[in-house]
Amino acid sequence: MNRQSDKPILRLEGIKQSFATAAEELHVLRGVSLDVSAGEIVGLLGPSGSGKSTLLHAAGLLEKPNSGKVWIGKRECLGLSDRERTRIRRNKIGFVYQFHHLLPEFSALDNVAMPMLIAGISQKKARMEASRLLEVMGLSARVSHQPSELSGGEQQRVAIARALANKPAVLLADEPTGNLDPNTSATVFQSLFDLVRIEGVAALVATHNMALTSYMDRVLTMSEGVTVQSKIS
């Protein structure tokens, strides 16, 4: 089921961020505005140091920018208290990083179930949902395996399933296939693509991998602190 919608779920308006250095003030973001709809994958390209990670941190309410607005659904989030932003980050935003950060002593199933257990969902329901997500990710035969028993691509697919365990509205991914070989990278990203479509999540994905742009609905390139629309080849 494709749940892509034209309705923006994530909207950034005029995000500015600068950092003071010994020599000067470094302007990383100079008024970035973008939106991502439900079921849509928007790619964010640019070289190291172009501001991709800084923008994702602002979008994920991990860092407060100098100015601008971050809307998730109908709610502007930067004006909220620290406690409210933490609650929204926990319930509405899923994160995938270059390194999977799985708990080594737990199985794939328990790693995915963990965020739901922390959120107060019963163990039975959490494990059922974790099993479903892992099946969508093509890992139904690996649910009982610990991370050390999984390949790098399998570990990253578990991390993606975990990021979507609490049914977030927004998925933010920072180089999610950066440590994988090209074939494994394509497999993992196909799984991410499928899950975003099925779950109807608004996904913003930062990557250096141009080969992954074929999976994107739109591609934005960071250039001089702003985003520029790019064509998908």
Image: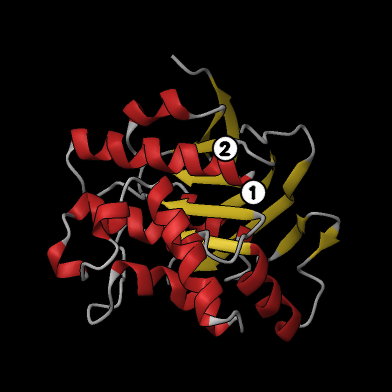
Under tag 2, what secondary structure?
helix
Task: Write the residue at 39% across / 50% down.
Answer: 135
Judging by the rendered image, the residue that carries numbered circle 2 is 197
Image quarter (top left, top right, bottom left or bottom right) of the N terminus: top right
**Of the pair 14 and 155, the residue shown nearer to us:** 155
The relative height of residue 136 versus residue 20 in the rendered view (above or below) is above
Q: Which mark is residue 229?
A: none
Give the CA distance from mark 2 to mark 1: 31 Å
User: How dense is the environment of label 2, judged by Cα within 10 Å: few (below 14), some, or many (20 and up)?
Assistant: many
Of the residues tagged 2 and 1, which is closer to the observer?
2
First of labels 2, 1 by sequence position: 1
Amino acid residing under circle 2: Arg
Instruction: From the top left corner, tell me how far across and down residue 203 is, in percent.
Output: 57, 45
Instruction: From the top left corner, tell me how far across and down residue 9 is, in percent.
Output: 74, 48
Task: Write the residue at 59% across / 66% down.
Answer: 166
**Of the pair 16 and 83, the residue shown nearer to us:** 83
The relative height of residue 224 versus residue 119 in the rendered view (above or below) is above
Instruction: From the top left corner, tell me how far across and down residue 174 is, in percent.
Output: 42, 53
Instruction: From the top left corner, tell me how far across and down residue 173 is, in percent.
Output: 46, 52
Quadrant of the image occupied by residue 101: bottom left
- For the question of whether residue 18 can be seen, the reply is yes
Task: Write the residue at 56% across / 27% down.
Answer: 217
Please, which residue is most extreme toward the top here?
Answer: 233
Amino acid residing under circle 1: Arg
**Of the pair 198 and 45, the residue shown nearer to us:** 198
**Of the pair 37 and 134, the residue shown nearer to us:** 134
Task: Write the residue at 60% across / 79% down.
Answer: 121
Quadrant of the image occupied by residue 62: bottom right
Q: What number of labels is visible?
A: 2
Under tag 1, what secondary structure?
strand
Judging by the rendered image, the residue that carries numbered circle 1 is 30
